[in-house]
Image: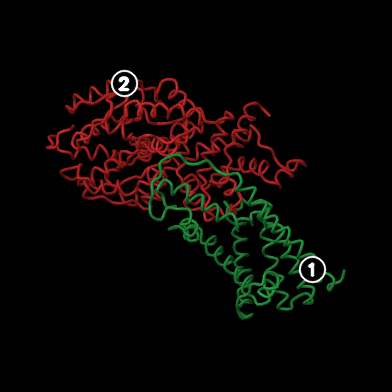
Chain colours: A red, B green
Amino acid sequence: MSASLEKGVRVLKEVIDAPIASYFSSCVHCGLCAEACLFYTETGDPKYTPIHKLEPMRRLYEQEYTLLGRLKKMVGLSKPVTDAELGEWQELVYNSCTLCGRCSAVCPVGNDIVYMVRKFREGMSASGNAPDGIKGAANRTITIGSPMGVKLPAVKAQMKHVEEDYGIPIPLDAEGTEYMVMLSSMEIINFPEYLGAIAKIMKQAGKTWTLCSTAFEATNAGMQIGNSDLARVIVSRIVEGAEKLKVKTVISPECGHAYTALRWEGANLVGRPFTFQVKHIIEVLGEFQEQGLLKTEGFETDKLTFHDPCQLARRGGVIEPQRKLMKMVAQNFVEMPDAGYMNWCCGGGGGASAIEEGEELRLEAFKKKKSQLDAVKPDRLVTACANCRIVLEEGLEHYQMDIPVIGLTEMIAEHIPDQTQSEGA
Amino acid sequence: MNEIQLLTWVRGDGLDYAVGIFLLGVIWRLFEIYSLGRKKDLSASRSVAGASGWHTIFRRSLPPAGMVKKSPVSYIGGYTFHIGLAIVVFLFAPHILLIQSLTGLSWPGLPSQFIDLAAVVTMAAMVVVLADRINKPVKRYLSTFGDWFTWTVTFLPVLTGWMAVQHLLLPYTTMLALHILSVEVLLVVLPFTKLFHAFTLFGSRWYNGTVNGHKGVAV
């Protein structure tokens, strides 16, 4: 057994817990999880059946943690997990799984399959079997500070542009504010209008907020790759930043997995509860709307639909606020089939979009999104995740569908009158 | 050993061994699974009505929207043979008498004609789900020896029980002995095969519901 495999097996043994043991013991091989997975439905290849993606971990569980499995191992009746096998499984655990969680939502015996994939990735990563694309993103986040190599000067340049364009100051490292706003590299590079939108919205709501010079990047490739050590380093920066600035709430940007990393995994990664709250920007906008702090004027008149990011809706529990926000500014808002809790993934979540060799499969899987869109034929597509947005744009371009994709926060901000009565605090 | 001796053994020592292995097996397996425990979730929870382990235990007994259409045989066949098995096992008068002799518990049974029908429907549903396992690429791909084996050990008690009552193929005594023997095989293998889902599915649903309920998601 190679040193890396040994490490991988050790990590896998550590992450196998009672839920995983219960899930493996409950599976009856009914195959219903395949029907929920876009990588199976769009390719028809049974190897993409979600529970099959866990086969090496299942065997390891059986061999290490069950009486019968240990007996079988002792007399040489069981097949050991090998390096070659884990290498072969890379495509199944990363390229063809976006951690979207639809499988976990349909399993009749109740198995949370995506919970297991997330844990399996820990072993895959430890044994050196994570894809280079996400590994690179994780390493850049650790060494440079962001997966796309964005450094503070780029953020400052962005701040300056936004200040000039919107005439609103962008606070940096302001202590004791209510909100600390996080960004994703994608927003810094591709969607600068997000920061402008935040400035307008906060000003109208009269809320204090700040960016943090040591923690502006919210994405966490360490979590996607399945390396809790890296994920912890990345999350710790945000925790330290938020505690140093004594903010009440950290706002996760329009990014699905950043929200999961910070909101649900963060405290577990650092090993203690947070002293601040974590909210997705859509939750914050929803609260402002409820409290009457968000006042918009005018409506979009073309046909709009909303793509629910998996980590925000199905895996994060934020489903209604985005709909209320859409209705606030869109006259012709239509829902795609399966929208909301059971929406289909864009195909690029969970780090999959960073895997170059997975592109062909990703575009194949995008046919599911295409069919959803074909059912309602929207003029534009709105979402709340910069990664979904990029993946959607690539897919739409590939299938020559002329549907612009926009972020919900920026669309809301466009409807905020420039001169508002409630001047910012 | 003649059929009378066989019947005596399966009703006596055989049954004791089978029930003993079954009970010890169930206790061991439950311990081996749930003693692994899990880490406390340190993230702040979001509470939402309907999102809990208990809700999921019940909710997952019903098919999620649109799923029956995608895999009708799994759902219709699955419900039919599970409910059929429950009726045949727990509502056939001789079975109730046996349970009463073992535990003292008793309840009214159903007329034997109805049990006959239920047994036939159960076997038909089991044959259909088996055919589906052979025909459907995903199910065939996932299937291992364990799947064919557990199907067989579940099917045989129904088949032999029905044949004994109908006096088919073999003398009643012999068939009855084979029926009890097949049930004993089922009891012995249940804790150590996928049939153990009969116990763990409650824990699995509970964990799924609890972990996601913590996030305010009703799964």
Query: Which chain's residue wears label 2?
Result: A
Q: Residues within 10 Å of mark 2 (few under 14, many from 20)?
A: some
Q: The disc labelled 2 sits on which kind of residue?
A: Ala
Residue A235, x across and y down, in percent: 42, 30
Q: Residues within 10 Å of mark 1 (few under 14, many from 20)?
A: few
Q: Is residue B148 visible?
A: yes
Indicate the secondary structure of the residue bearing disc 1: loop
Q: Nearer the viewer, residue A155 or A35?
A: A155
On the picture, is B22 further left or further right than A251? right
Residue A154: image tag = 2
Q: Which residue is mark 1?
A: B12
- The relative height of residue A287 versus residue A228 in the rendered view (above or below) is below
Residue B136, x across and y down, in percent: 57, 55
Q: The disc labelled 1 sits on which kind of residue?
A: Gly
Q: Residue at x 78, y 68 (%)?
A: B10
Q: Residue at x 77, y 61 (%)?
A: B17
Image quarter in which the N terminus of chain B is found: bottom right
Q: Nearer the viewer, residue B213 or A375?
A: B213
